Amino acid sequence: MFAREPLLRVTPQGLYCPRADVHIDPWQPVKRALITHAHSDHARPDCGSYLAQRETLPILRLRLGAQPSQLQGVDYGEELFINGVRFSFHPAGHVPGSAQILAEADGERWVFSGDYKTESDGVSRPFEPVRCDVFISECTFGLPVFSWRPQAEVFAELHEWWRRNQAAGVSSVVCAYALGKAQRLLAHLDRSVGRVIVHSSVWEVCEALGHDLSGFERANSDIRAQGALVVAPPAAAGGAWLNRFSPYSLASLSGWMAIRGMRRRRGVERGFVLSDHADFRGLTDAVAATGASRVLLTHGYTAPFSRWLCEKGIDARELDTAFGSEDGEESP
Amino acid sequence: MTDFVSLYFALSETSSTSQKVRLLTEFFGAAPQGELGWAVHLLRGEKLERGLSSSQLRQLCAEVSGIPPWLLEESYQVVGDLAETISKLAAGKASGERVSLQKWVELVRSLREAPLDERMAKVAEAWRHMSEAESLVFNKLLTGGLRIGVSRGLVVKALAAAAGADEAQVSQRLLSLRDVREISLPALAEQGSGSENMAPYPFCLAHPLEAEPQQLGEPEEWIAEWKWDGIRAQIVRRGGRVAVWSRGEELVTESFPELELLSQKLPEGCVLDGEIVALDGDEPAAFSRLQQRLNRKRISITLLKQIPVGFIAYDLLELNSEDLRNVPLGVRRQKLAAILEKAGISKRDLRLSPEVEFCQWQQLDRMREGARENGAEGFMLKSRDSLYIGGRKRGSWWKWKANPYSVDGVLVYAQRGHGRRAGLFTDYTFAVWKDGELVPFAKAYSGLTDSEIREVDAFVKAHTKERFGPVRPVEPQLVFEIGFEGIQASRRHKSGVAVRFPRILRWRKDKPASEADTVETLRQLTS
Ligand SMILES: [Zn+2]
Ligand SMILES: [Zn+2]
């Protein structure tokens, strides 16, 4: 069936399109890279040039130190041809600027999903399924025990927790990834509850994305918090940085919080189940919506999820990649 | 009013003991009649009789959720808790009513009599009207215990606060109220009548000695006894009767009829604390021998003859119906020696645990290595002036074990851990060499630091061939020093030996797998 050379394959540098001679989200430096989004396991430094959805470019500059001359931006849906292969970027709903990449040649369509979620989060362009023949999908949460509730319910719980802490004179520290989760959180906070303090690395990402930060406070060494809500990247938890906010209650915002054992292991007092990845049903539905006859799986529970799809009559296999090993939410 | 499900989650989300006591006190104070007893029963770690086995529950969950059994199994391996896994796959919609623990318990207990399809239908119907959180707690009842990290002591403390009684009183009353339904706050506050009360005292527990013994102070202030390798127990002799209680506050009188018989010779109104040991001739034997006497419905005469037991007494908690716990240990031991002398019981059956004489800690340390030849695991060190304090208060009783046996084994299988370590490969099987082949000899879960666990986890993920199923065969590369407390020949094990309490002592990064120990090394240890 696929006797020709496949349109995309995995090489030691990463996912590669031989016909166009470009890599997608390579994990080693290459000449030309197409980037789905700016998380660390998808966008790595020292490539010759980067092509990404426009919103992702400022984050690549911030995080990888890429120069403007190395960066090229495209809009969602915009077509571009590289050595006769047609590429286009489509909303993945994962984080602001995140995209799925469609490659098409000789009437054959391959889509690499990057990371995605199917629920609309209010800050990223919502996921749009793209019809294709081969779908390379992530499946970070590819087990049926992962089933997300609507984000409105989760945010309601989070506000209740914040109010309770406030009444007890305790600050509320929320660990959220600087790109994606943090913007999603900030966009849904009810600012009438109290002050909101933002860690510098989160602040910088928001600024780069051009988000409005008026009314938020940037954390500095003198800041004190009593009753405020503090948004910090996971790396700041457990460090001395948090001492200035004592007494505080620490919460984490992640899909892994669905499992009590993992919540205990992370040592957080509260875990809110909120993910920027699709849950099991979301993944299953997304695969079906592409109409793909063949599915290649990356990230997470690739073995059981491929077997699950196979039992549904889809030719699904695991694809060995280096994704999901560094980005916070992708490793339990 | 909080319900039991909210209590369960609130308790599991706090690590603060005082917060736990506060939550429990509040719940006990407001619990409706009929619910309190069951809550106490379950929180103290007791289990309900199982109406459905784990595999029946799995089957039902697969049917209800439409998830294939293998995928349920994969999910369970990641979640690490069957009750939680099922709650996520088969939860329905909450009824919105306050959960009645009593109704749940009645439902679970009613399963025993029903035929299988009816049992399945009852549970499926119950799941339909439960939220995920409710289902989790309900499934815990179905699968056994709550295992919630609340000690019996905390439950007693909270009950005492709610009932307005003191803790000793409440814990005695709890032991005498054998029927769960009799438990109520007024009943706990009531004084039990002395003669019918056969309850033991809360056991005084020892801590492992981690520091150098020199730090305990002068040797003459301490009593050293052998640490016997048996079952800790109290013999209660009151009102013409005898009760034998194990450390888990379990009544074991019927398992040891010979102890019941000989204790009739003890004076009325006394309580002994000591160790039940199996006897080999006149001498205490290893625990593995005693084990054959445990968990049996009936004790046959043949078994009584084959494996006789004796009692080694080391403390006297009550004499002439008077509580001696606030008398110094030195004095209690003198009184104990005196009544044993007078009772006229053979020394083989009931003896005083001898005080091991020593002038210097070093001397005792040397003797400790020979503990096993004496049928003991090491020493117990007790402060001569110490009072008998129930629970795990630190400072007056220490256990100082002989160094364990150890061999170097190769990691050959790994399995995902449960609870706090859900998702990580933390349960390991180790093997030693036999004719150029590796044969498994021990499973161990503990002993590595968190960072070592992550390192091994990464190794396992990168070095397994088969990706399905819970147990992953691992390329034999990593070597660990495995310690254990006992070893005996066993025909059931491929290695020919069975080890007791294996644990990881350290990771031998300096050793290649080829230099791990052999079955021969293990066999030599059994002799
Ligand atoms: Zn990502
Ligand atoms: Zn990723």
Image (spheres, coloured by chain):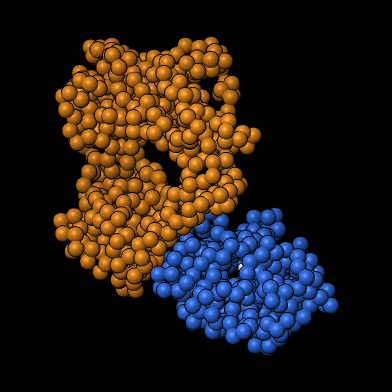
Chain colours: A blue, B orange
Residue B95: image location, x then y, percent: 31, 73
Q: Name the quadrant containing residue B231.
A: top left
Answer yes or no: is residue B103 visible: no
Residue at the far front in the pictured view: A3
Residue B387: image location, x then y, percent: 42, 27
Quadrant that contains the C terminus of chain A:
bottom right
Residue B332: image location, x then y, percent: 37, 20
Residue at image position (51%, 57%) is A262
Q: Is residue B213 above or below residue B360?
A: below
Residue at image position (65%, 88%) is A77
Q: Is residue A260 above or below residue B452?
A: below
Q: Name the quadrant containing residue B239.
A: top left
Residue at image position (49%, 18%) is B368
Residue A45: image location, x then y, percent: 76, 66
The mark tally for this picture is 0
| Position of residue A11 in the picture relative to residue B211 (left or right) | right
Residue at image position (50%, 12%) is B358
Q: Nearer the viewer, residue B17 or A307?
A: A307
